[in-house]
Amino acid sequence: MHFFTYSSLLLTLSVVASTVSGALLHHVHRHRALTCFEDNALRALERFSSDAAVFCPKFLGTSGEKIPSKLAEVPATRMSSACACFQKTAAPANPASTPATSRTTVPVVAPTPTTTSVSGTSSTSAPVTPPSSRSSSPSVQPTRLPTSSKAYNGGKRGLVYDYKSKDYSKFFKDSGKIAFGSDWGHRRSPAPGVNFDGAFVPTIRVDGNLKNDGWSDAVKALISSGTSMIFASNEPDNRGQANLSPSQAATVYKNYIQPFAGQVALASPAVTNGGGATGLGFLEVFVASCAGCHFDIINVHHYVSRRDVNVEQAVRAVQSFLTKDVAAFKARHTQFQDAKICLGEFWLTDASDDDGAAYLKALLPWLDGNNEVACYQAFGGLWEDNFINSAGTGLSKSGQVYHDN
């Protein structure tokens, strides 16, 4: 889904550059939404977001719109609620923000913005103070926290999955490339049949009171079984995901992630590659709220649409985002200067299977060879028409590249 209309000139000169610098609004409807988490049917729509974006408004308006074949796995009785959730979470994370084409930002928090370029064009992105409405909870008070370091010692390549993944992990059993898996929660296998030899990396999710009573015991058990890294909140800067203010994200980090310092590698909240008050701008304010917090990993996500860039530009966008924007952020903050990078999610959305395969073929060797990158997870994953073919009988072309290369 696209929220702004670009002219062809602005597409060349503005969208590509802003994608590299993180200023382009990311696609917030691409995977599970915390606000509608119990509506599992939502995720079927999110995997075919372009189709759902056209279908759902018509269906909700008349309830007589024929369900397209790609969305047929959603029961007709669940379609209304799934579409309602999709409509809610497919909106921009900060609807009051200035469209990306204007390049207007609010006052800068960091001392120096970063500038990156593609094809001779440049774009400047600077972390910004988020709107006051984002910080609804009281500020975090300084507290004495454990600060021991623990380097992540696992392999780089991870695999994402969820309740729809069935037994598709069997297609990666003989890969030798998959080191870990994650499912946006703290339970290893929400789907019957998901079973792989790699470690499991849990992600903290909290309720409206910022609580998760099962987290600590689950993490202790996972550490005993070989887990060597834990993820903080998933996209707190995205209202369709964890949807937390920076101070709330800091509270969650102090209560649930920091206590495991020195036992496992601690990953920061995973932020998007959005601009303004999202992405690294959000993380700037989070760090200020998280006094005494320790980080072994900086966790970032990167999405860009094939509608906006070609495969080569998409690869360069990831590389520039990590080596310039993320590197500059790390240099500004002593807590992150020794932290490695986890590209916790990345993908070329709205791409064909052939383009997805080409994207991975070009990017995976670079990620594997970059010593600053500790881990990554492509948002392919264990679903049909992602890393699994549409029939569910084997790997897609992009899945085969992730398996082999």
Image (cartoon, helix red, strand yellow):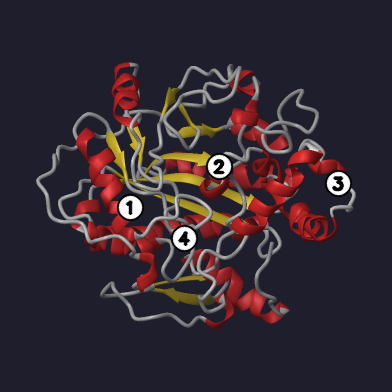
- Point out residue 363 in the picture as x, y percentages from the top left corner: 55, 46
At label 4, the amino acid type is Ser
Mark 1 vs mark 4: in front: 1
Amino acid at the residue labelled 2: Phe
Q: Amino acid at mark 3?
A: Ile
Mark 1 nearby-residue class (10 Å; few <14, some 14–19, many ≥20): many
Mark 2: give few (<14), some (14-19) or many (20+) Cα within 10 Å.
some
Q: Nearer the viewer, residue 371 or 397?
A: 397
Residue where numbered disc 4 is placed: 320
Find disc 3 in the rendering and name its residue: 67
- Disc nearest the viewer among 2 and 1: 2
* Secondary element at image label 3: loop
Circle on res. 37: 2
Number of numbered discs overlaid on the protein picture: 4
Label 2 – label 1 distance at C-alpha: 19 Å
Earlier-in-chain disc, 4 versus 2 = 2
Give the distance between the C-alpha atoms of the residues marked 3 and 2, in whole angstroms. Answer: 22 Å
